[in-house]
């Protein structure tokens, strides 16, 4: 399909990218193209398609809700789908208050604004925010400022506020130097926390966009202890890791940490509708209740608590909770396949957490711009598998409902793609 004369695609350089593939429909783990070809969606369409495309229970829940209440302003009004979702997510996250927005970036913005204003409402002077090297929290300005400076953020550099940055001691199978790197990162954190700090933000267990960079749960517990001891707030950005992606419902649960704020989106609606939520502790919520108007959290989006999104999220939670083994056992499905692939001469630093399996390709620079990712993508497409490597980092993150045969086909496609790259 040629480029459409009136569309602008995300993170796409038209001058050097192939034209987009025209999709006609999608079901389960496959998308069907208008020319009849079928592709396995091995990355869950940018990590959102949780159970599978067109999951019937979610589609039905949205259809029912659309006939009852499609949307209503959420200031002055409330409704049952929002209340049910808040009650359920509160029980699952240990955070009592839910604030709605529309996507992952806004869920992070809201978390940061709540943290910042909460301190201000107390009359406290904490002006430092700490984030980690390699962090990615979204593309809006606040989220960009929290993220690692990169090719993505360079044009806006003068507009981004400063944050203190701490090393992220990511690891992989057979990594023998990880403890040293963890100690180094914790020393940096200790030093940063000597300055009065409003909040520390992290992606628990896996930094997604910067290359599926996995840390050990013990490191996160050590970070959380230090943040708590310093009296700062801990923000967990679970936009990517939430809803079973890491083998537990939330990465924080798997790591054994309790944040003060949590940003969620992507898998929230099972990948059907754009919605973000920020979970906050009751302590933070109470810090905004006052006769003083300026203590109010003046933030709101037109589509706050969209009932269709809430209905989708509730149906998705039903599925997750009815079949926890689907996410709990996914790592066990990846492991033998990744072990086999790890023997390939071009595979470096294999790693796997829950539904995510990744490795680095030994080919040139470790960079998002390394063309090897696009080469692998092209080869896999020819074999009916859609991947979107992050430069030299190849990862699989399929929907939970992917069949064993489909999963094996993904690995076989990656192996063949790698074979074409072996010199000689
Ligand atoms: C950890 C994390 N936070 C925030 C975002 C931003 O989410 P969105 O693209 O929905 O704005 C992403 C997106 O990939 C993410 O991985």
Image: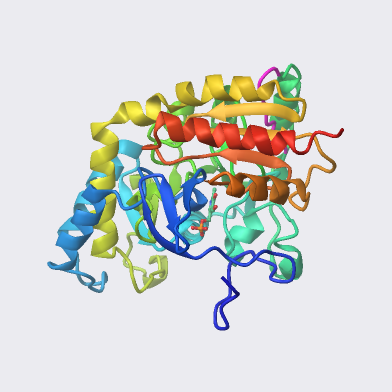
Point 31% across, 37% down: residue = 92
Horizontally, residue 31 falls left or right of residue 136, namely left
Q: Magenta: predominant secondary structure element? A: loop
Color theme of the render: rainbow
Locate residue 186, reporting x and y percent: 69, 29
**Foreground of the two, 161 or 390:** 390
Locate residue 185, reporting x and y percent: 72, 32
Horizontally, residue 408 falls left or right of residue 362, namely left
Is residue 202 visible in this depiction of the protein?
Answer: yes
**Foreground of the two, 33 or 172:** 33
Magenta range: 167-174
Locate residue 80, reporting x and y percent: 15, 57
Up/down of 132 relative to 182, above or below: below
**Foreground of the two, 175 or 1:** 1
Point 74% across, 71% down: residue = 15
Point 38% across, 70% down: residue = 300
Horizontally, residue 96 falls left or right of residue 421, namely left
Locate residue 362, reporting x and y percent: 79, 34
């Amino acid at each position: 399909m040629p480029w459409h004369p009136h569309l602008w695609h995300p993170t796409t350089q038209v001058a050097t990218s192939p034209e987009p593939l025209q999709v006609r429909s999608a079901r389960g783990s496959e998308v069907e193209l208008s020319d009849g070809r079928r592709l396995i969606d091995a990355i869950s369409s940018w990590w959102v398609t949780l159970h599978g495309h067109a999951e019937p229970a979610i589609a039905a829940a949205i259809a029912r809700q659309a006939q009852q209440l499609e949307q209503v302003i959420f200031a002055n009004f409330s409704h049952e789908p929002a209340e049910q979702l808040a009650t359920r997510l509160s029980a699952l996250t240990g955070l009592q208050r839910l604030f709605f927005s529309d996507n992952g970036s806004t869920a992070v913005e809201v978390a940061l604004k709540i943290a910042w204003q909460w301190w201000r409402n107390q009359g406290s002077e904490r002006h430092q925010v700490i984030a980690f090297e390699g962090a990615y929290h979204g593309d809006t300005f606040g989220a960009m400022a929290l993220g690692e400076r990169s090719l993505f953020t360079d044009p806006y550099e003068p507009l981004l506020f400063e944050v203190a940055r701490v090393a992220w001691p990511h690891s992989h199978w057979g990594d023998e130097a990880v403890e040293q790197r963890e100690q180094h990162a914790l020393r940096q954190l200790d030093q940063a926390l000597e300055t009065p700090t409003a909040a520390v933000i992290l992606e628990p267990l896996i930094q997604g966009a910067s290359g599926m960079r996995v840390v050990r749960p013990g490191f996160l517990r050590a970070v959380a202890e230090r943040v708590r001891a310093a009296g700062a707030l801990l923000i967990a950005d679970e936009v990517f890791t939430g809803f079973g992606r890491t083998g537990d419902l939330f990465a924080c649960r798997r790591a054994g940490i309790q944040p003060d704020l949590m940003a969620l989106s992507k898998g929230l609606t099972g990948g059907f509708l754009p919605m973000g939520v920020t979970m906050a502790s009751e302590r933070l919520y109470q810090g905004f209740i006052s006769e003083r108007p300026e203590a109010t959290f003046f933030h709101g989006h037109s589509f706050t608590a969209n009932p269709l999104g809430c209905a989708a999220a509730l149906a998705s939670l039903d599925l997750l909770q009815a079949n926890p083994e689907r996410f709990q056992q996914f790592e066990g499905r990846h492991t033998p396949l990744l072990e086999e692939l790890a023997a390939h001469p071009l595979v470096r630093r294999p790693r796997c957490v829950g539904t995510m399996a990744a490795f680095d390709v030994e080919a040139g620079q470790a960079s998002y711009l390394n063309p090897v990712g696009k080469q692998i993508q092209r080869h896999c497409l020819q074999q009916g598998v859609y991947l979107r490597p992050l430069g030299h980092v190849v990862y699989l993150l399929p929907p939970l409902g992917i069949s064993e045969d489909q999963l094996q086909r993904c690995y076989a496609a990656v192996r063949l793609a790698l074979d074409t790259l072996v010199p000689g």
